Amino acid sequence: MGQVLKNSDLVNKISPVFELGLIGYPLGHSFSPRLHLAALEAAGLRGYYRLYPISPDQDQSDLKLRKLIERIVSGKITGLNVTIPFKQKVIGLLDRLTDVAAQIEAVNTIFIENGCLTGENTDVPGFLVDVTNCVSGIDTQADVRVDGLPDLVMVLGAGGSARAVVYALARRGKRIILVSRRKEQADRLIDSLISSSGLFKSEPFPETVTFSHLDKAIGKLQDQEVLIVNTTPVGMWPDVNDCPWPEHLAIPTKAMVYDLIYNPRETLLMKQAMNAGLPAWNGLGMLVEQAALAFERWTGINNSAPKMWEALNHYVDKPLNDGLKR
Ligand code: NAP
């Protein structure tokens, strides 16, 4: 008599195994495995999400990176996320980039499309989707703002994530004030976005200022509504008592704050804004949205964000003061 197969055995025999993972360094505190495993489970897919920490200082780190990416080509890995310090470095190992990845010159998701090893950047749409969702919940002047976002945005920091944020908001036609410790760094970011993406031909040209001259920039704002986006790591665990906003300056009265940091869930910058009666959000939503978009590239399954939120909230011990577990 032949072997009797249960239904689940049949599913296991015919369904593919999604081999997913993350390259970067360090990766110890990554939330990504929780998010992607929850999405796989919700979709009834078999798979794994593995962490591949490659220290840039270790011997043959370039070779290790290349060999890992070759495993996508050979089909042993379905797709990978990429984080610091490899978002630019992987570009030279890929066949093609999506428009967004090419324009901001950074890749956070690798997948195979039409037989080509493709680099995508889901941080840009992930940020935009989440910040728009957050801000659209506020009804002040919603009738005059087409996408719910103020026309003026102040971006704190001029590193890798600032690049994605500036690109995303500038493409929406927002006027940007880019604040950095060194003005040359902010100017360089703008120049490089101009050459890689052609931005700012028709979009408002950004203003760059240093933190030490922030008072002058704020003085000019008067009563204008402004979205302040923190892209510096200042305030991130374990340095939770640090704040990127200068101590001697009040946060503008019509500001709303979006902090890319999500650990802790309430940064000091967010607390200061909320204490002044201003809305503030952390970067968990961006993390979830970029993950959901990457998951879609690998599996074809969209709208995994709610399941990813559920998985995160399972680990949440304390909701934020607006009652939302963000
Ligand atoms: P990055 O490339 O290293 O850039 C950090 C920027 O912050 C640099 O411009 C740096 O300026 C500035 N900075 C650092 N310390 C500062 C200080 N004490 N005062 C003023 N500016 C300071 O880092 P990143 O990749 O953009 O990441 C930044 C933060 O965003 C991290 O906390 C990361 O976890 C978070 N993030 C969140 C998400 C999400 O999905 N929510 C996604 C990406 C990043 P200098 O060059 O002068 O040092």
Image (cartoon, helix red, strand yellow):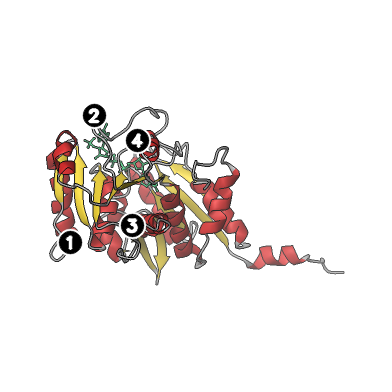
Q: Is residue 71 visible?
A: no
The residue under label 2 is 248
Q: Are marks 4 and 2 in contact (CB under 8 Å)?
A: no
Closer to the chain start, of discs 2 and 1, is 1
Q: Gap between marks 4 and 2, in whole Å?
A: 46 Å
The residue under label 1 is 199
* Depth check, front residue: 70 or 251: 251
Closer to the chain start, of discs 4 and 3, is 4
Residue 124's mark?
A: 3
Residue 59's mark?
A: 4
Residue type indicated by callout 3 = Val
Report the residue at 43% width, 41% height from top. 262
Q: Residues within 10 Å of mark 3 (few under 14, many from 20)?
A: many
Q: Residues within 10 Å of mark 4 (few under 14, many from 20)?
A: few
Q: Gap between marks 3 and 2, in whole Å?
A: 32 Å
Above or below 10: residue 80: above
Secondary structure of the residue carrying numbered label 2 = loop
Residue 181's mark?
A: none
Hey, which quadrant is residue 109 in on the image? bottom left
